[in-house]
Image (cartoon, coloured by chain):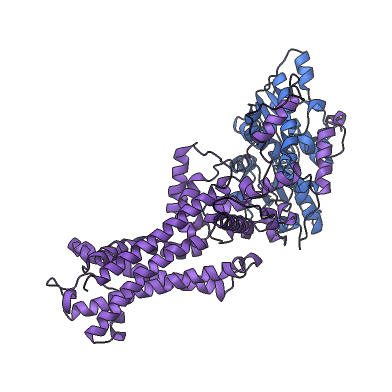
Chain colours: A blue, B purple
Amino acid sequence: MDKKELNVKTMAQAAAEGHSPEYLYWVGCMGSYDDRAKKITRSFVRLLNEAGVDFAVLGTEESCSGDPAKRAGNEFLFQMQAMANIEVMNGYGVKKIITTCPHCYNTFKNEYPGLGGNYEVIHHSELLQQLMDEGRLKLKNNPFAGKTVTYHDPCYLGRGNDQYEAPRQVLASARIEVREMPHHRENAVCCGAGGAQMFKEAEPQHEEIFTYRTREALELKPDVIATACAFCNTMITDGVKHYNKEQEVKILDLAEILVEGLEDKK
Amino acid sequence: MQYLDNLLFVILLAAGIGYFARNVRKTIRNIKLGRPYPVNDRKGERWRNMLLKALGQKKMFKRPVPALLHLAVYLGFIIINIEVIEIIIDGLFGTHRVLRFMGGFYNFLIGAFEILAILVIVAVTVFWIRRNVLKLLRFNMPEMEGWPKRDANLILYFEFVLMSAFLTMNAADLKLQMMQYGHYASHSGIVGSFPISRFLLGILPDNPEALVAIERSMWWFHIAGILVFLNYLYFSKHFHILLAFPNTYFAKLPPLAKWDNLESVKREVELMMDPNADPYAAPAGDEPEPERFGAKDIFDLKWINILNAYTCTECGRCTDVCPANNTGKKLSPRKIMMDVRDRTEEVGKNIDANGGTFKDDGKSLLDYISYEEIWACTTCNACVEECPVENNPMDVIVQLRQYLVMEESAAPAELNMMFTNVENNGAPWQYSQADRLNWVNE
């Protein structure tokens, strides 16, 4: 599927054509640069194409949302990033933003309004749920039938923004039954990437947080660990590798799970 | 001479309440050492929070066993204190069981108090075993060594002894009533019902004078104990029984991942990004001195952070769910709260000793909380979600980070690199912004 031609416009192209897309899809730094996360981005865009969603991306005009700077205490840098991004987005008259990153989602939704950026902000799990509910996305098969799938709640989506339901609904509407880890929803354990930890070595410890979290998931003997955050995906992938389980366990984003259901055969 | 008891009682009561009031005023002063942070939004949600989480103890029930034990002590505390009203009236006027006019309902009340009292005794015994015999991990972490551990046990002893005195007092009273002795006698039979203390009759002496002495001394012990306990709150983690109410009212409301945008920073960033601003303009004369970015000491924290610290009952649930702590890192959210309180107390004593103004002692909150702790937090909000009284240890960590980064440029080197990348490339890594769309054709 990865080689499938994607239909992606930038906001600049759309503006040149005199069109203002319904949604801005904010890809985020992980989704733009990280090899693993780029696959999630491509999967999600394929779903958007499939459902005929009218969207565009900022492309080279996109920048960091400022989240890692803010969580690391650099409020200056955060606000500079935010104000610059708001200028770009307001320039294009953006009304609705979709993000695949819970961190971008949180900053746009909760922290940009105070700096002059007022948008309807939608996490891709929320949009996917809507597209499934409306029948705009139709799956042709269920490659996960009979498989054990668990879902890891990203902190900035779950506890941070009380969005526990949409990702689970997406999986349910793909006829996937979720086996919950003992710590899930508001009791979920962090993957270890948040608060700018992604960008630094951990303090002295007896264990990495990602192995601590992944161990709980692996105790369910899952075939798939589903997530809705590229950072969580990276951390849990590292955890699975730590336990030498990468042959048995796949770590997939919700978008990737749905894309697999688009295929005819299997 | 017959009024001596009553007089002594009045003096004891006034002293007990007076000293407590003084310490409450001191606590309020100390809380106000924090920065002003107005909270006047979403009042309905706040009252609801207070009712559910302070009065209703909703979050305690995430862990049912301690929740039920705690509920017994909590109900016992609140309901048995209704009896204190009678104790105070009897004490002031030398009456005996003045509320007896309530008749059958009075008997029911006294009976209920006794059952609660025995439940409290059972619960505090189990609590003591959990702390000292089973040695539950969260009660035996490094920050609990010394006073915090003693404090916790003292509270349990207090409650045990108070309830025992209450039951012994009732038993002696019952025995005297049964003997129709002096003003304990009643023409309408036994006043009150004594489902628990009647089992103590056998161990009490039969001599009425001795019984009166026991009844009176237990009565005094109970009321004096309550006043001592009241005054102990200020020095103890047990302050939560009062402060949980304002604390849950003023607590952060969801979404938990929404952080404030610092106004002080916003002013400067707007100035920087405004092409018409004159960077060399002299500040207007009446402008206040610019605030410190982030927090170095308790003065820079929000007052709510300090209220949180006084409310913390050191149960350690936050630390128990902290991913950093669970993987062996030094960070313990409970310790952050305890450190804020300890430093606030230190500052408060400094102010008391220096005639009402703080004399720089060359110390700060950073002498209590290390960089290692500050940088280990993943900001996952697990501690905030878990806290039964809605404390927010994470908010303190964040403000300390802001100080270290914006005032001291003391972030870990890797984070400084990340900042540089965000500034130059618009991404936390060293990738070119021109490559942002490469994923489309890969």
In the rendered image, is residue B166 in sight? no
Q: Quadrant of the N terminus of chain B?
A: bottom left
Image spot of residue B275 (x, y percent): 76, 20
Numbered disc total: 0
Image vertical order of residue B428 relative to residue B246, above or below: above
- Which residue occupies the foreground of this view, B422 or B243? B243
Q: Quadrant of residue B435?
A: top right
The residue drawn where x is 79% and y is 44% is B409
Taking the view exactly as shown, the residue that stands out farthest to the bottom is: B206
Q: Quadrant of the C terminus of chain B?
A: top right
The residue drawn where x is 36% and y is 67% is B116
Image vertical order of residue A53 relative to residue B55, above or below: above
Taking the view exactly as shown, the residue that stands out farthest to the front is: B355
Q: Quadrant of residue B187?
A: bottom left
- Which residue occupies the foreground of this view, B375 or A191? B375
The residue drawn where x is 71% and y is 45% is B403
Taking the view exactly as shown, the residue that stands out farthest to the top is: A18
The residue drawn where x is 37% and y is 69% is B224
- Which residue occupies the foreground of this view, A69 or B185? B185
In the rendered image, is residue B253 in sight? yes
Taking the view exactly as shown, the residue that stands out farthest to the left is: B187
In the image: residue B15, left or right of residue B281: left
Image vertical order of residue A30 relative to residue B186, above or below: above
Image spot of residue A40 (x, y percent): 77, 38
- Which residue occupies the foreground of this view, B393 or A257? B393
Image vertical order of residue B30 relative to residue A40, above or below: below
In the image: residue B392, left or right of residue B429: left
Image spot of residue B2 (x, y percent): 21, 73
